[in-house]
Structures are given as C-alpha cells and as structure tokens.
Image (cartoon, helix red, strand yellow):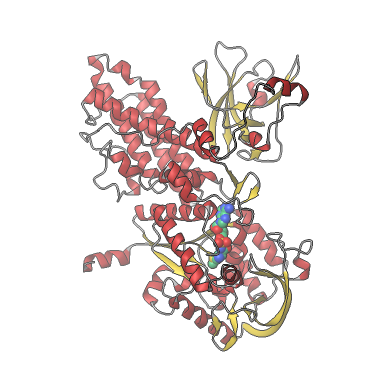
C-alpha cells in the first residue's frame, strides 16, 4: 500500500460486522450458514459502498460441551476442535464468505485478552468470589435457578439439566441494569427487531441475577489469571472475541478504528447474551456499546428445529453441489422474513430457483442477450426514441435501488431481495409491453427497438449490481454474456442508482442459461434412489385398495403446499369476464396479482382490506391474459362462496 492509499484508508468510514462464533462441537448446517451468508451479504454491500469493512466470524471452542464431545470421540478437545474448525473454514471458502478475520477462542491473542479483562473487572470490584448452586444445561452452556426450569428441564432447549454446586466468581450485573435500560430507551435501534427489544427490556425489568463467570468442575477453558482452579465461563470468554479480534490491548489504532461494532448479527436464541450480558461487560470496561444487535429468526424444518441429536440437519455443501452457490445463497438470504422463522424444504428451494432465478432473472438475461445478438449483431445499441413506458421502467429501477439500499441498511434481507427482484419482473413485463419481435419486423422502428434493447440491458446491469452481495458469481457469469463491467469483482453500489451507465457498444455473446430449471420430478427420483420401490402387482390393484381405505396423504404431502396469509390491497373486476376479479395481494413485503372466480359473490370494495389464505406455490398461470400468481382459498356450497379470512396474524405468515 502506498502512502496515498494509506491516507484514503484512514479517511474511509468503517463498518464492523460480526456473526456469533460457532461451537465446533460438530459440522455446521444451513442455520449457521444463514447467519454467515446474511452477514457476508451486508459486508459485501458496505464494501461496494466504499466502506472500510471488517467482517469477523470464528469459533467458540472452550466449555464443558466441547470437552465432553471430544472425550466421547476419544480425543483431546484441542485435537477434536482442530478438525471441525478446518471443516468450518473450508465451508466458508466454498460459500465465498469474505470474512476479514476468523477468530478462534483457543488462540493466544484471544486468551490473553480474556484474562486481562477478567482481571480488570475483578479489580474494579464487579467480580467477586462466592458459591453457586444451580442447574446447568450443557448444550446451552447456561446455568438456571430452580425457579427458571420448565418441568425440571432447560427452559431454552427442553433438555435435561444437571445439579451443580461449586465455588465460583460472580459478575455483578444488577448494578448496571438501570444504565442499560436507559441506553436501550435512548437508542431505539440498538436491539432489532422491536419484538426482541421488548423481550430484552422485560427480562431486564424482571430483575437481573449476578452472573456466574467461572467454573471449577472441568479444565477446558481460559484459566482465571489469579486463581488457576477456575476457568472463565465460556460465554464471558466468547463474547470478548469481538474485542480481541480487533486488537483490544494489543493494537490500539486498529481497535479505535473499528470499535464500537456496527452490527452483531445472530439468531434470536442468543439475543439475551448479546443485548444484556455483553453490554454490561462493556459498561464495566468503560467501553462504548455496539451500535446494533440484530436477531433474525430460525430456519426450521417441517418437523421442528434442526438439531444434530435429531439427525435432521441440512448440510449446505450438499445443496451447493446440487444447485450451485449463487442459488443456495439467494434462497437463504430471501428465506427469512425480518425477525421471523422460516421453514426449509428442498422443494421450496427448487421453487425459488425455478421461479425467481430461472423464470425471472435467467430468462430476462438470456432473452435480452438473444435479441441483442439477433437484432444488433451482438452489440448493445445506443438508446434513441423514448416512450412513456420507458419512464415507468426507469422509475422502477430508481425505486429498486432506493428500496434495496434502505432494506439492506435495516438488515431486512428478504425485503431487499424482493425490492431488487421487482425490477427484474418489471423488465420482463416491459418485454411483453414493447414486443420487440414486432418492432424488429419494421425497419422504421429500428431506433425504437434500439432503445428497448438498451433499456433492458440497463435493467439487467442494475439488477446484477443489486444482487451481487447475495450472489457472488452472478456479475462475472452475466458479464460473460453481456460485457457490462470492466471488473465484475469490484462493482460500486451507487452505480446501480444511476441510469445510463451501461456502455453502448458492449459485446453480447450467447452462453449457457445462468440458472437452469430444475425438474422437480427428476429430483424426487434422485432423492428416492435408496428407497425401496413399491411394486404394483396384479394381485393388488390400486383401485381395490381405494375402496377399503380412505386415500390418506402424508404430512409431507400437505407440507408441499405453501399456504400464506395474504392481505388484499386492491381489487377490480376483469373486463368482459363476469365471474373474475383481479386482486392485488400483499404477502409480507411481496406483492402479487391473483385472478379469482368470485366476482358473483363479492364486490371489489368488500374484499379490499381482508386477509385471506393464498396457495402461494401454485404454478403461476395466465387467465384471460393476466398472470395469476396463486389461488385464494374459499368454502362453497351450491349457492354461495365464502373466502377464508384471518384476523390476527399479519400477511406473509404461513398457514399450516
Ligand atoms: N457459541 C455461541 C455463540 C457465541 S457468540 C459470542 C453459539 N454457537 S452456536 O454454534 O450454537 O451458533 C448459534 C448461532 O448459529 C445462532 O445464533 C444463529 O446465528 C446460527 N444458527 C444456528 N441454527 C440456526 C437455525 N436453525 N436458523 C438460523 N440460525 C441458526 O450459540
């Protein structure tokens, strides 16, 4: 780096983002990958905005849980974690995670800081020696009082707890509770989303017990510096990684540059550690608090939470091999509505790939490229004759940029994707509206055709920039077909906010589809390879069975339906079709058009404002020229039809 660059770096605004450091008790699953990909998306976005980003992830390697798992496998804890950590690092490489650092709590640079901080807080008088008796949940590494247990089990994970009684150091948390409450009140964005903030506030108000911060019953931890019989409690140790990685106590300049962190991202399971214990530790150290602590929901499976003990975890590596990295990352980033849980199924993943990526994005790119090759010998033409519909398209591009930026800044990943993909849908609609194949037939309309092609290319350029933080190979792969970018690895975010940067004359070449469609049927066959095939014999014809038994479907069959609460935000009669209404519905952030045959039973005014149930993964179909994206559920008898409505649950949520 030369001197000039050094100055620029100092002047650049910083952005420090972290994921939780994961327990290397086992290989990671798509739940962990979700947080890491979401944080990566944020880090890439901020780099594209020109910020000096520090993206930290790592592993939380001490504690009773790891010690036990290692011993069960007949290994020393250090040896055991080395193997898993190496798998985790490989996984992040495969997923093109751009972390600037990877901290392991067993590193010297971290252990030294833990001891320094333990000492400091002790000397300040906020840590004292006493004895505790309580119930310890080893998987959660959390101690509970008798009162906190639920049916004698861990209130967080429902597993068995163990009675423990030992001498221990305590951290006086109650002392800082009023200050923390004041801080939360004065900084409404500190804890996101609001539901978590409320949860944290009421937890603090219910009274904070002092926290036990050392253990004597096992050895796998950082020794308490002034009493070697004790090791530091694993959470007190782990949270400090956010300081040790950026040079606390060793590189003051780096530390001052990046602290306080801009975002600690995690799932809701560990919000209390980050929004209560961690800020109080920082107060005891007289350090400023992080700017934002944000908790997303969980990725669930149909049968409940993913867990190693249930043996139902989904390995991201297998999905990437099957569907490609961009597609898997896209699915993950879009999967969770802000703060809410989502349900993973391979079928939903395939639907996302087919509808969003193959039908919408991939198709837009390949159709546009093919037309530019056919009509303009493979060079993006300069725009010429403008019409009103072009202004609408430009407005859609501006809105996509503005909304994608706003939503990403708020860490609302799903809404950001929806905003970007709205531009893609708008551009596809623009192809239908402008019908370039008709313009191409008339030499006099060549100039108009040039404008249409240019505008389409421009929408693709903008959409690719907006989606680049999520799909790291998209720009490079698109560039091989439409040569927009001089360096697709160094895109600038603001360039998505400026119309007209697409270079006229850029070369367009034919390529493979970026997102090939996946045939669900072939997938089922593939997945069923190991299953015994049921043979149909002459002796037992399917029909005979149907007479004696009702035709049951399995819960999995039912789960294939994606039913959602949808709010009707607009409705009109379809012209020349007396039974049909065209509804505009909202599912969370997403909007869809649905054609429904209920015009004889409802007026449009009666329907607007109702929350109905939508079959959201029904294959879109054109009805009288209007694309219907789903079907609303209704009960009926011979005279009447009544749509199913929902009162309390907000739009976008699942019905099951
Ligand atoms: N080691 C602690 C964190 C210490 S941070 C100072 C820990 N580790 S963990 O391995 O259990 O990881 C928990 C985190 O993994 C969650 O907060 C979340 O970020 C991610 N997830 C694990 N399972 C998940 C889902 N099923 N869904 C979404 N995120 C999930 O807790």
Q: Is residue 629 above or below residue 415?
A: above
Residue at left offset 47%, top offset 81%: 112
Quarter of the image that includes the N terminus: bottom left
Q: Is residue 417 above or below residue 449?
A: below
Residue at left offset 60%, top offset 75%: 233
Q: Which x, y percent locates residue 638? A: 75, 14
The quarter of the displayed image where residue 380 is located: top left
Q: Which x, y percent locates residue 219? A: 58, 79
The quarter of the displayed image where residue 202 is located: bottom right
Q: Is residue 602 above or below residue 78?
A: above
Q: Is residue 411 above or below residue 150?
A: above
Is residue 1 in view?
A: yes
Q: Which x, y percent locates residue 653? A: 63, 40
Q: Residue furthest bottom?
A: 226
Which residue occupies the foreground of this view, 76 or 329? 76
Which residue occupies the foreground of this view, 28 or 19? 28
- 177 lies left or right of 59: right
């Amino acid at each position: 780096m030369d001197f000039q660059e050094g100055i620029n770096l100092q002047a650049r605004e910083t952005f420090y983002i972290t994921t939780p450091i994961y327990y290397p008790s086992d290989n990671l699953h798509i739940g962990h990958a979700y947080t890491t990909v979401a944080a990566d998306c944020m880090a890439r976005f901020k780099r594209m905005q020109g910020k000096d980003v520090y993206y930290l992830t790592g592993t939380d390697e001490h504690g009773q849980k790891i010690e036990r798992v290692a011993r069960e496998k007949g290994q020393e804890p250090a040896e055991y974690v080395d193997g898993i950590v190496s798998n985790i690092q490989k996984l992040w490489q495969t997923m093109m995670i751009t972390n600037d650092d990877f901290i392991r709590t067993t590193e010297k640079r971290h252990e030294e800081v833990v001891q320094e901080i333990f000492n400091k807080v002790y000397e300040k008088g906020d840590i004292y020696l006493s004895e505790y008796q309580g119930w310890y949940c080893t998987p959660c590494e959390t101690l509970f009082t008798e009162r906190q247990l639920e049916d004698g089990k861990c209130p967080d994970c429902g597993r068995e707890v163990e009675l423990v009684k030992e001498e221990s150091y305590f951290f006086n948390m109650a002392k800082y509770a009023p200050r923390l409450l004041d801080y939360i009140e004065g900084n409404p964005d500190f804890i996101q989303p609001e539901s978590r903030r409320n949860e944290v506030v009421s937890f603090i108000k219910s009274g904070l017990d002092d926290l036990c911060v050392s253990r004597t019953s096992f050895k796998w931890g950082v020794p308490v510096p002034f009493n070697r019989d004790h090791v530091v409690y694993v959470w007190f140790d782990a949270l400090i990684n956010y300081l040790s990685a950026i040079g606390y106590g060793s590189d003051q300049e780096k530390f001052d540059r990046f602290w306080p962190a801009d975002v600690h991202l995690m799932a809701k399971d560990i919000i209390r550690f980050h929004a209560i214990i961690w800020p109080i530790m920082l107060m005891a150290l007289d350090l400023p608090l992080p700017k934002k602590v944000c908790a997303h929901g969980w990725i669930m499976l149909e049968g409940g939470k993913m867990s190693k003990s249930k043996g139902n975890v989904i390995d991201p590596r297998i999905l990437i091999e099957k569907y490609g990295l961009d597609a898997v990352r896209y699915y993950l980033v879009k999967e969770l509505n802000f703060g809410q849980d989502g349900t993973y199924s391979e079928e939903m993943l395939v639907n996302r790939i087919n509808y969003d990526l193959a039908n919408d994005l991939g198709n837009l790119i390949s159709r546009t490229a093919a037309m530019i090759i056919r009509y303009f010998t493979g060079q993006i033409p300069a725009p010429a004759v403008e019409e009103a519909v072009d202004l609408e398209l430009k407005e859609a591009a501006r809105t996509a940029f503005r909304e994608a930026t706003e939503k990403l800044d708020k860490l609302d990943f799903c809404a950001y994707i929806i905003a970007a993909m709205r531009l893609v849908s708008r551009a596809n609609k623009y192809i239908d509206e402008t019908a370039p194949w008709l313009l191409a037939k008339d030499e006099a309309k060549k100039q108009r055709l040039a404008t249409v092609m240019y505008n389409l290319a421009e929408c693709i350029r903008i959409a690719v920039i907006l989606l680049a933080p999520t799909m790291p190979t998209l720009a490079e792969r698109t560039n091989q077909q439409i040569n927009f970018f001089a360096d697709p690895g160094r895109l600038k975010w603001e360039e998505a906010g400026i119309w007209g940067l697409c270079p006229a004359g850029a070369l367009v070449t034919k390529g493979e589809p970026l997102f090939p469609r996946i045939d669900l049927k072939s997938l089922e066959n593939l997945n069923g390879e190991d299953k015994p095939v049921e043979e149909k014999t002459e002796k037992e014809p399917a029909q005979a069975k149907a007479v004696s038994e009702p035709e049951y479907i399995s819960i999995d069959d039912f789960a294939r339906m994606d039913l959602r609460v949808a709010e009707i935000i607009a409705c009109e009669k379809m012209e020349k079709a007396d039974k049909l209404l065209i509804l505009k519905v909202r599912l969370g952030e997403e909007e869809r058009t649905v054609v429904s045959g209920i015009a004889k039973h409802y007026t449009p005014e009666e329907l607007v404002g109702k929350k109905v149930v939508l079959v959201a993964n029904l294959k879109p179909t054109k009805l009288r020229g209007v694309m219907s994206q789903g079907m609303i559920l209704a009960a009926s008898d011979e005279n009447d039809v009544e749509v199913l409505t929902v009162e309390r649950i907000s739009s976008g949520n699942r019905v099951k």
